[in-house]
Each structure stands twice: as C-alpha cells, then as structure tokens.
Image (tube, rainbow, N blue to C red):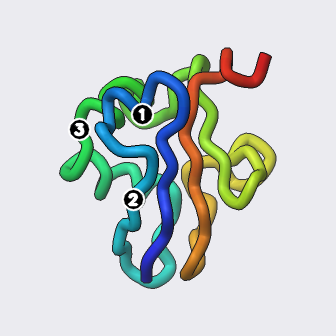
Amino acid sequence: MRVRVKFLATLFQAAGVLSMDVDVGDGATVGDLLRELRMLKPRVVDAVMDGGSVRSEFVVVVNGRSIDFLKGLHTVLREGDEVAIFPSLALA
C-alpha cells in the first residue's frame, strides 16, 4: 500500500524533499510508517521522535487530522492517505 508523506517547514530541509510516496504493508499504522521512514529519512525521524512517541514540538496529521485526535501512532493508514509532518510552531 502506498501513502504520501509531506515534510513541511524545517523538516523539508532535513528530508531534502517536500513529499514522497512510501510503500507500507496493508494495515500499517502511523508508527509503522515512521519506522519505515527511519530507514529512508533518518534525520527526519530522529528530529520528530523521542523514543516511542512524537515529540511535543511536532505534529503528525493524516488527511488533515492530527493523530492526537485519532489513535496516535496506532492510527491505521489506507491506500492513498496523505501524512504531513511539521513543527507545531508552524500552526501559530
């Protein structure tokens, strides 16, 4: 299954791209996606993650909805979903 990941604000510089398509297994979660991204864009994931959770200064959204209001890292992804990752200060 393929999802699109967007790297916004300062994460664009760390990723070197604005967006990319990532293949993950059926039933993959946001946590699974971040583990896959660690192999592809380790600088991004190192900046965003603190152990097993997203740092408070970053926001992860799936199709425009913060994972904080979904099931967090356990949010299940579907084919074609769009995941955006950006600093929370970008919301201000």
Amino acid type, callout 1: Phe
Q: Residue at x 64, y 48 (%)?
A: 72
Does 2 appear above or below 74? below
Res 33 → quadrant: bottom left
Q: Secondary structure at mark 3?
A: helix
Q: Which of 17 and 2 lies nearest the eye of the viewer?
A: 17
First-in-chain label (2 vs 1): 1
For the C terminus, the quadrant is top right
Mark 2–mark 1 Cα distance, whole angstroms, equals 11 Å
**In the image, which disc is placed on residue 12?**
1
Q: Are marks 2 and 3 in contact (CB under 8 Å)?
A: no
Secondary structure under the numbered disc 1 in the rendered image: helix
Dot 3 corresponds to which residue? 42
Q: Residues within 10 Å of mark 1 (few under 14, many from 20)?
A: some
Question: Which residue is labeled 2 in the image?
Answer: 20
Disc number placed over residue 30 in the picture, else none: none
- In the rendered image, the vertical position of residue 62 relative to residue 56, given as above or below: below
Disc 3 residue type (three-letter): Pro
